[in-house]
Image (cartoon, rainbow, N blue to C red):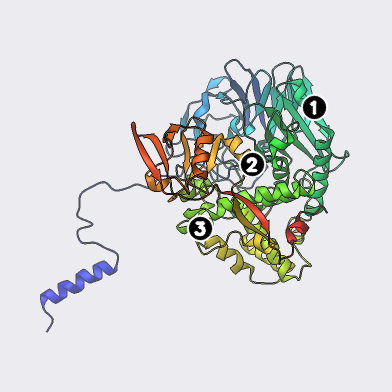
Amino acid sequence: MTTRFDRLIVIVLAHFLQGGAIGAQTAPGPVYVNPVVAIPAPVDRPFDGKIELHVDATDIQHRIFTIRQRIPVAKIGAVTLLYPRWEPASHGPSLTVTDLAGLVVEAGGRSIAWRRDRYEPHAFHLDVPPDTRVIDVRFQMVAGGDALTPDVVAVPWQRLILYPAGWYARDIPVAAALTLPDGLHPFTTLDVEHTEGSTIRFGTTTLETLLDAPVLAGRHAKRVPLTIAGRGAVSLDLIALRPEDLAIPEARLAELRKLIAQIRAVFGATPFERYEILARLSDEGSAGGTEHRASSENELASTHFRDWPGQILSRDLIALEIIHAWNGFYRTPADMWAPTPNVPVSGSLLWMYEGQTEFWGRVLATRAGQFTPEELRDRLAIEAAEVAARPGRAWRPLSDDVNYPSFMLRQPVPWRDWQRRRDYYSEGVMLWLAVDAELRERSGGHRSIDDFAHRFFGGAVPGAATRTYTFDDLCETLNAVAPGDWNGFLQSWLDGHDEIDTSMGLTRHGWRLIFTDIPTEAFRAGEDESGVTDLTYSIGLTAREDGTVRSVAWNGPSFRTGMRTGVRILRVNGAAFGKDALLAAVRDSVNHSIVLTIEQDGRKSDVRINYAGPLRYPRLERIPDRTDTLARLLAPR
């Protein structure tokens, strides 16, 4: 017999199975209201008219750009202007509207009120009066950094423009003009229509092209052609603080010319009509670059070309950025392509976009003579050791590290080897070394990663639309070069944890990672660049000259004492801290314990490091019974 209690149980169970909860509808409280999307989505359609843009870069005293625009409006009523948020080179929301100030919008001399979107601060909504065909916009942009100085001006268009929502960037024509301080010489891939005094008027182009074509101008400037004139021509455009910095040894220019030839031998026809290597030589420190389809921005030391031995960590920077013209712009991952700079993208294939570019940069710079094979092996040893010593892989695979731009962009991490941050660069080099070794073995030595590149990046035409690709496209091309289970090969690495031997590519190429008590020149250069004594692979820390600990290896000997980043070492075995004292203590650790006097959280204490071993620095060693296919990979084509 069914009782009333039984029926109640049935009703309660049914309620749970339907996703309900007892009392959910009777508890008092607010109800969330989903935001109303008030920003028109981008649509691939013609844009009526063109945006006129004028950037005044002469206020170097205040370091402020002044921007004026005339923007056609397609209809009366609601119009939304967007300030760019995402940059292709950063793969994330790296742009901020914080530095935009003084925004004024007018129509026929009368002010138009604007209001910032409640959910998207990079969007500004307007109510355009009837009979309005064009609006006038002006604002200032705080330059920040060293973009606007008396002798050097860098013009980042993506920070200096507002554009109407509702169109693809490739559909919006823009006629840009730029006023520079007197005496500066500009370099850019934009076509110059004419010049009036210090104002340059560029030919009308699309918003997509403009955002990808920075201007670099300097008082001390020099252009060096690296190829013959014509389609695919490449030039080195130098901006320096001093005239003498513009002198480049002929050997360096010869290597750059060889580099262009080696790049073309691998990737084929160029996806650009001409290419400008925009190189800024300064005394500021470490090198860095930003890629574009027809140009690249390269921050180099003022001694970059003169002190070649000291540039072992940055000699391939120019190569990396040029290669991105193919791997990144001509061909780009489908989930990284966006119709406007205000649409989010994904980085699932950054191990291809950045990782393979990093791989090719090392290889092609060596083929061009910018590295000797020995120097390149020392670079690879550093990367192999770094990747192999990433304990963070135990919880975070490479397939998650590629999400770095979406939530870790330019954020410091105190435990880099555990938290992981942009490992798709160095681990990507190891991955593609393994792919090359696999291709060679599967094809009996007849095919290599060069064959993959010929197929995947071949057929470029200047000005052609970007060709997107997916993970399946990569596997399909690899399979065409050397049949096999490429999906499984790649996926096992991407999703793998501690079971992955990240040095397998080196081993299969005939080399193995070892550690010795003498650092290589490349390792010393890394210490000099970061300003530390690097004992990562012995006691597990790096320390600056003043004893401040810059990094601590997760779960290493120093970690287990309770030390962390920012701790200051005062004494080493009773002696005042110094690099020599620290190195001597490690060398003698087999005979005597290492005792450090540290200052942490405002307190001084002695910590004993449980380590008894030699100094350990990475390098590569030949495996006698294996063929040296790495030498074949690095041989010029």
Q: Nearer the viewer, mark 2 or mark 3?
A: 3
Where is residue 139? Give x, y as percent.
56, 23
Q: Are marks 2 and 3 in contact (CB under 8 Å)?
A: no
Tag of residue 397 = 3
Q: Earlier in the sequence, mark 3 or mark 1?
A: 1
Amino acid of disc 2? Ala
Q: Residues within 10 Å of mark 3 (few under 14, many from 20)?
A: some
Q: Amino acid at mark 1?
A: Ala
Q: Local crowd at mark 2 within 10 Å, few (<14), some, or many (≥20)?
A: many
Lower position in the chain sequence, tag 1 or tag 2:
2
Label 3, label 1: how far apart the Cα atoms are: 46 Å
Residue 153 appears at what percent x and percent y? 67, 24
Return the x and y of residue 287 as percentages of the image width and height: 64, 35
Q: Which residue is mark 2?
A: 169
Which residue in the rendered view is the most extreme toward the bottom?
1
**Quarter of the image that includes the N terminus:** bottom left
Q: Position of residue 604 (x, y in %)?
A: 34, 33
Question: Is 105 on the left or on the right of 9, as rendered?
Answer: right
Which residue is disc 1 drawn over? 247
- State the separation of the CA atoms marked 1 and 2: 40 Å
Secondary structure beneath dot 3 equals: loop
Viewer-proximal residue among 124 and 359: 359
Q: Which of the two discs, 2 and 3, labels the residue nearer the N terminus?
A: 2
Q: CA distance from mark 2 to mark 3?
A: 35 Å
Q: Is residue 419 above or below residue 115?
A: below
